Amino acid sequence: QVQLVESGGGLVQAGDSVRLSCAASGRTLSNYVMGWFRQAPGKEREFVAGISRGGGTTYYTNPVKGRFTVYRDNAKNTVYLQMNSLKPEDTAVYYCAADLSRTIITSYVQHYDAWGQGTQVTVSS
């Protein structure tokens, strides 16, 4: 099984930038489609961004398009989420996840098999 550990969250102000990292161990991350999700208090976990195995294809939910960038460094077995122009509504626990079976990016929580523990991002206004 693959183990995922997120880092990089914290308390920032609106308009700031944050980069989240998701480091993997146990398996080679380049074999998997990776996704970033977030969950705000009282809300369901939602898809934020996904990236193909080679990194050439990415997909974003509309509220973050143009502000967030997902990329991966397979040599470092790490996936990143660069978040710019942060807004208070971006406040959530952010999770990275690996889809161990599919070769295309999907936005469904249930399609992802391995999850990190999450990292809190709080954006103050």
Image (cartoon, grey):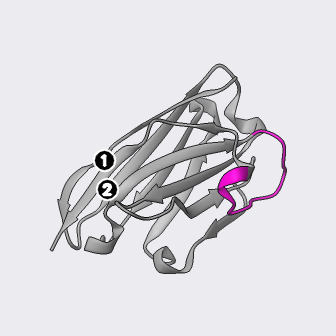
Image coordinates for residue 66, horizontal then vertical, percent: 48, 78
Q: Nearer the viewer, residue 105 or 43?
A: 43
**x and y, in percent, of residue 92 in the image:** 35, 58
Residue 87 appearing in the image: no
**Three-letter residue code for mark 1:** Gly
Whether residue 88 is visible to the viewer of this picture, yes or no, is: yes
| 90 left or right of 49 in image | left
N-term mark: 2 or 1: 1
Q: Amino acid at mark 2?
A: Val
Q: Is residue 123 left or right of residue 101?
A: left
- On the image, the x and y values in percent for residue 125 come to 15, 74
Q: Secondary structure at mark 1?
A: loop
Q: Name the residue at 44% across, 42% down.
A: 21
The numbered mark at residue 121 is none
In the rendering, at what x and y percent does residue 28 appear?
71, 27
- The residue indicated by pointer 1 is 9
Q: Residues within 10 Å of mark 2 (few under 14, many from 20)?
A: some
Above-or-below relation of 55 to 124: above
**Which quadrant would the N terminus be assigned to in this image?**
top right
Q: Outermost residue, top direction? A: 26
The residue tagged 2 is 18
Task: Give the Cα distance between marks 2 and 1.
Answer: 7 Å
Look at the numbered discs 2 and 1 and tell me whether their residues touch, using CB distance below 8 Å. Answer: yes
Residues rendered magenta in the picture: 100-110
Residue shown at 51% from the left, 36% from the top: 116
Asked if residue 117 lies in the magenta stretch, the reply is no
Whether residue 108 appears in magenta in the rendering, the answer is yes
